């Protein structure tokens, strides 16, 4: 078992942790009344046993990114209000990144904020969404545009849950793991490359899943600990996400987040090379690793460059109407850009990077 701490959140990583999640929630939630939130797919598998062990109600919503809306936030909030749950509530979010973001936003705003415990069951949620306190929903203008920072009371991670995760979700989560290697841990990047095939195997050894999850979480915890509100260094976690969010949105969320991030990292690494910030060859190295994991490495012709650029300008990371990009210098090191950690780039270079990734 490993335990980390981040801004008051206890992060427990242990094979088998789901089996005693109720005891861990009780230990962190200080006599509060738990309510469990999960999507309809995860509910029977993982959330119902946790709810029953806690003696808590289980609220569900339809699975998928299309549920990450203000309407779904309002529906879940109304469910809490109808049950007259008070300020002594603790929301327990069991599931993937959509559930964590949505239920986390419900918790952040319910009665001006009640605690949340995350029990992430997808790779993307374990290594990214559940760590760091970002919550929110999508709007028709783009992804994650309405939300709040709300640090969880605890994050309970059972890497064994990855064994039941559909292959496409395991693969998609690998994109965020690759990102963590690129931005801050070259050795971790090479470890992923050396174990690529095995990491997608559902019968992966528990120790390997745990190592994968911990390698990423250590990077994320270190970055967020240094910059909780994304005033500077946390922006490096957005590598691949300015373009990635745009193409995820343009795909009508048919692409999984990690799939869009894989393609986004390749475009942004090419952009870094064109701007002469990034060591030549890095984009090819990231592309080769993504390809070996079966992640998308090309931007299809249906993703129009103008549409990508328009969405990038409306991204929450944009400043003064200009999209900003976190760019690698070399594997394991990002461009600090005088403490800004992200830079506006000439649109002709962004276009060239998109076209070079067709
Ligand atoms: N997913 C990027 C961040 O948490 O800052």
Image (cartoon, grey):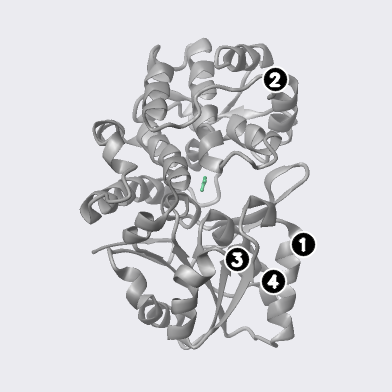
Circles 2 and 4 in contact, beta carbons < 8 Å: no
Is tag 1's residue or tag 4's residue first in the polypeptide sequence?
Answer: 1
Give the residue at mark 3.
103
Image position, residue 323 (x, y; %): 67, 29
- Mark 2 vs ligand 1: CB under 8 Å? no
* Image point (77%, 42%), residue name: 141
Q: CA distance from mark 1 to mark 2?
A: 30 Å
Placement of 140 over or under 303, stated as above or below:
below
Labels 3 & 4 near each other (Cβ < 8 A): yes
Q: Earlier in the sequence, mark 3 or mark 4?
A: 4
Name the N-terminal-most of marks 1 and 2: 1
Residue 43 rendering spot, x and y as whole percentages? 53, 70
Looking at the image, residue 313 lies above or below residue 35: above
Q: Which residue is mark 2?
A: 305
Q: Classify mark 2: helix, strand or loop.
A: helix
Counting residues from the N terminus, which is met first, the one under dot 1 or under dot 3? 1
The residue labelled by disc 1 is 71
Image x and y of residue 160, in percent: 32, 60
């Amino acid at each position: 078992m490993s335990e980390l701490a981040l801004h008051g959140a206890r992060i427990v990583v242990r094979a088998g942790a789901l089996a005693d999640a109720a005891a861990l929630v009780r230990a962190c939630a200080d006599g509060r009344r738990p309510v469990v939130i999960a999507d309809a797919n995860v509910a029977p598998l993982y959330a119902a046993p946790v709810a029953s062990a806690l003696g808590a109600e289980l609220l569900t919503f339809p699975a998928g990114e299309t549920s990450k809306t203000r309407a779904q936030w309002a529906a879940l909030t109304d469910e809490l209000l109808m049950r007259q749950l008070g300020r002594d509530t603790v929301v327990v979010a069991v599931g993937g990144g959509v559930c964590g973001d949505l239920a986390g936003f419900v918790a952040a705003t319910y009665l001006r904020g009640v605690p949340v415990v995350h029990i992430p069951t997808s790779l993307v949620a374990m290594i990214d969404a559940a760590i760091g306190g970002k919550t929110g929903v999508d709007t028709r203008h783009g992804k994650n545009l309405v939300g709040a920072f709300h640090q969880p009371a605890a994050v309970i991670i059972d890497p064994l849950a990855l064994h039941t995760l559909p292959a496409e979700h395991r693969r998609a989560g690998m994109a965020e793991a690759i990102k963590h290697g690129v931005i801050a841990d070259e050795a971790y990047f090479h470890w992923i490359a050396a174990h690529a095939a095995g990491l997608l195997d559902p019968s992966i050894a528990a120790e390997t899943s745990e190592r994968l999850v911990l390698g990423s979480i250590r990077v994320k915890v270190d970055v967020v600990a240094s910059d909780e509100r994304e005033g500077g260094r946390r922006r490096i976690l957005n590598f691949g996400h300015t373009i990635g969010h745009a193409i995820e949105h343009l795909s009508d969320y048919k692409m999984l987040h990690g799939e869009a991030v894989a393609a986004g990292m390749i475009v942004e690494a090419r952009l870094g090379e064109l701007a002469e910030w990034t060591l030549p060859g890095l984009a090819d190295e990231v592309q080769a690793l993504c390809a070996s994991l079966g992640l998308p490495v090309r931007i299809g012709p249906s993703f129009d460059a103008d549409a990508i650029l328009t969405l990038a300008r409306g991204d929450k990371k944009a400043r003064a109407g200009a999209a900003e990009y976190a760019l690698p210098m070399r594997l394991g090191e990002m461009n600090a850009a005088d403490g800004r950690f992200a830079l506006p780039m000439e649109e002709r270079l962004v276009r060239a990077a998109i076209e070079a990734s067709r």
